[in-house]
Image (cartoon, coloured by chain):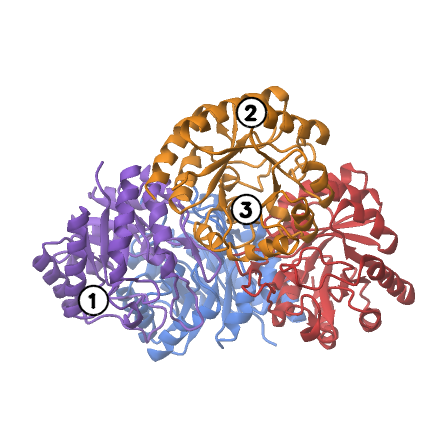
Chain colours: A blue, B purple, C orange, D red
């Protein structure tokens, strides 16, 4: 029985120092624990709640820093794209194109991602059920690409909360694609009056353990050396120092299922 | 006290005959009742659940038929756009650019719409509260456009249902923009296993009356001579023959508030 | 077309002075506006969140003060019962037995209420749909009582919020019983960490107007001369001074439907 | 590290044969696997959706059959009570008094259960958050009883679905009481138009595995030799033949945490 894989990194490419530090530490931990590791950072944040939030260093800089990480640490990488024309732009630098949850129904975007031939990882909309993701899978397959992953990131639960429904793990696995739990965004507290999404990072372990027990293939965890000063998603990222301890528990759990 | 306005038409531009018939009948009804009328039809459907659903006649044909309606009946028109490059393409043919609910957080799209100088009507995401729409309003204002409208279209309520929270009407009016109730999509039943969104069109009157009573400025109602054969949203469109009776009731209600 | 009726009063019988003051003022307003009025106060609060909350003056005192109001102002009265043995105890003093929302599925309680021959007003559980209230109606009818009312009080929407789904008004009216909107408890904000349920009383007008527009037969509004010092539900009660202005608007709206 | 315990049995006491068969088989399995076992069956069903549903064989018969099981197999037993006067009636025959989810806020019922000195297991209301169960715990402690358990059974998610939020396991464990996952009722599909609650029993494994991984102390699983003919909750009970295989997996998972 093979181990789960990990998609991890800072929410957004803040600086070269940051992405290198995170890739270095996480790749070492994953090597020790036998966890296949995919580096993640967004080169652009296109759907921040507020117009005054940080959106990136520019697409070129962001993508080239991701590529630098790939080469320096021999890692596959992933980032999210937000419009069909970004698929071609980003695909040379990344191995898995991630489709944001809000955009998982945009046919043009799914098709453009599919046509790159890269792996397409579609995040399930907060407004969708697991079984209805079969339509996203079909759109990508119809465009000629069978390298598909689906990611659970919680469902809308009142205005200011999300809830993870683990039945979706079982249901999405029935679509015969790898299923990933996004342990970071599942804990968001949206619609805050400040315009800054809140979080509950102390519950990352709860979310991740239940995901492993119910059979996910991969985990997505945003991590940062100092989440309090992060430029995006600081409220939910796991402090980098806590990652190793969590992964050790999860590897043991994985062996028991 | 002025009357409410009406945004109405078929979900999608199916044919010239259809758009002309609907515009002709609805404009006559609205003239009789003193209701300012905006013709609505989508020139493209970009986020259908299933890849096999009808997505339009082609952008050029769709937009030119909308323009034909505008000129033939001297009506303003609206349609939805789905990517920033569509803003420039569509804006010569329409008066109100509608931002789909799933895309209401996409900063690039809001900015591109704002820059056309046209009215921008943002549909509230099914995952958002009314107060949090202030961030969408701010993004558009910051891009130099103060012609903004907001549309309520229901919130996620379990996987297969939406609920309209009328507190949002009050809350969005506090943002000092016209607020519209989308009586059609608020009644959707999403995530059906068939991939075709269901509906409850017999409840359009309930949704619309509560909206008028709570002070909306406009109503959005998709209508079709024969919803059963419509190429999109057939499950929720109001039969054209029933529109006049409903509007008469609503005009009386409006006078009482 | 007849007017709506009003069920109103303080949440709980706090003192003789309070119930007399409220009954006096509300009955005068309702006489002026042609609104049939039912006095409401709970003689016991059995399901407070916290054990340290006020639960009443004792059943005997509470019920006898309600009875005193009935006789002094020639008003029908209502209060809620919480266990089957309370039906017989309370029914001599009240005209409408109200079944709390949490208890609307308790068959013994519904049957005991039915057997008093009084009107039974069942509040819809926060976890129930309007159509499923037909089973509560059937339990009461089967026990030989056809004097049934149903009350909408909002549905669970995440942990700390309720939402009123006005489709339920239409659906419950199809059961051929009078339908009431509880404008007070629909605005509760449950599950607060303090153990004291919060509220949004400034939205009572929004809730009530949408209810009248969608055809409710009655409104339920808790009111208090000074909600800030009330012993229960202070967060949601309407200040008594504001009742008249609200009712005047609602009477006009009612005439337009 | 000790094992989890199991509360299991048929939903309701249907017959002596049934309760004996289930107790016999489940106690054998649990002995083999080192799982402490508590026999469960309701002696009365007081909150069936529909008045025509089966409610039990009568309280005396139901309780005496539960007692017979206890003595025959030397097992502790649990059943649910619905009114304060049932606490004294039922407590001689059962070891754990279970408070139904709809009734978890009824102070009189919690106090009456507390006063028996038996263990009180409160099911979390479908409308409550985990942290707010601290008020139920406090009511029982204040009545002098510290033998308290809390059970998760899912939260309202739209009208016809429930969702299990595993954050509640973590949050309720912080109240320092044993926490149980009710794997049966968490899978209910309420508010069906038939008046018979539906279910998803094929997902019991998903619910249970996530519960063990997140640290529950006990599991609650209704089981029946032939759920299709069961007189209550047939849509969700686990077929007795499948119990052993499931428990074996769960015991392995438990050892890994």
Which numbered circle lies on residue B13? 1
Query: Which quadrant, please, contains the C terminus of chain C?
Result: top left
Q: Which residue is mark 2?
A: C73
- From the viewer's side, name the closer residue of D46 and A85: D46
Question: Can I make out residue C168 in this image?
Answer: yes
Lateral position of residue D225 relative to residue B144, left or right: right
Count residues near mark 2 (Cα–Cα under 10 Å), then give few for <14, some for 14-19, many for 20+: some
Rounded to the nearest whole Å, what is the CA distance between mark 2 and mark 1? 63 Å
Above or below — where is C146 with respect to B172?
below
Judge from the rendering whether residue A172 lies leftward or rightward of residue D128; answer left or right: left
Image quarter in which the N terminus of chain C is found = top left
Question: For mark 3, does the 10 Å Cα neighbourhood hold few (<14), some (14 to 19), or many (20 or more) residues?
Answer: many
Label 3, on which residue?
C149
Q: Is residue D24 found left or right of C130 in the rendered image?
A: right
Residue B82 seen in this snapshot? no
Which of marks 3 and 2 precedes in the sequence? 2
Label count reads 3
* Residue nearer the viewer, D76 or A150: D76
Using the rendered view, name the quadrant where residue A107 is placed. bottom left
């Amino acid at each position: 029985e093979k181990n789960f894989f990990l998609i991890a990194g800072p929410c957004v490419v803040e600086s070269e120092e940051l992405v290198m530090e995170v890739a270095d530490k996480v790749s070492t931990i994953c090597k020790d624990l036998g966890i296949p590791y995919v580096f993640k950072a967004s080169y652009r944040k296109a759907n921040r709640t507020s117009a005054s939030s940080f959106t990136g260093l520019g697409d070129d800089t962001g993508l080239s820093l991701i590529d630098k990480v790939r080469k320096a640490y021999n890692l596959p990488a992933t980032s999210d794209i937000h419009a069909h024309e970004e698929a071609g732009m980003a695909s040379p630098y990344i191995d898995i194109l991630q489709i944001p949850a809000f955009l998982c129904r945009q046919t043009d975007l799914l098709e453009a991602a599919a046509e790159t031939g890269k792996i397409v990882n579609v995040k399930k909309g907060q407004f969708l059920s697991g079984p209805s993701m079969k339509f996203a899978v079909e759109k990508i397959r119809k465009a000629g690409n069978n390298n598909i992953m689906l990611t659970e990131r919680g469902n809308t639960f009142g205005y200011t909360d999300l809830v993870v429904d683990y039945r979706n793990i079982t249901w999405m696995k029935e679509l015969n694609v790898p299923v990933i739990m996004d342990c970071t965004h599942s804990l968001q507290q949206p619609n805050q009056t400040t315009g800054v999404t809140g979080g509950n990072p102390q519950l990352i372990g709860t979310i991740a353990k239940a995901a492993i027990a119910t059979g996910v293939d991969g985990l997505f965890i945003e991590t940062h050396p100092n989440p309090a000063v992060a430029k995006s998603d600081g409220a939910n990222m796991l402090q980098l120092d806590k990652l190793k301890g969590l992964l050790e528990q999860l590897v043991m759990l994985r062996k028991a299922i």
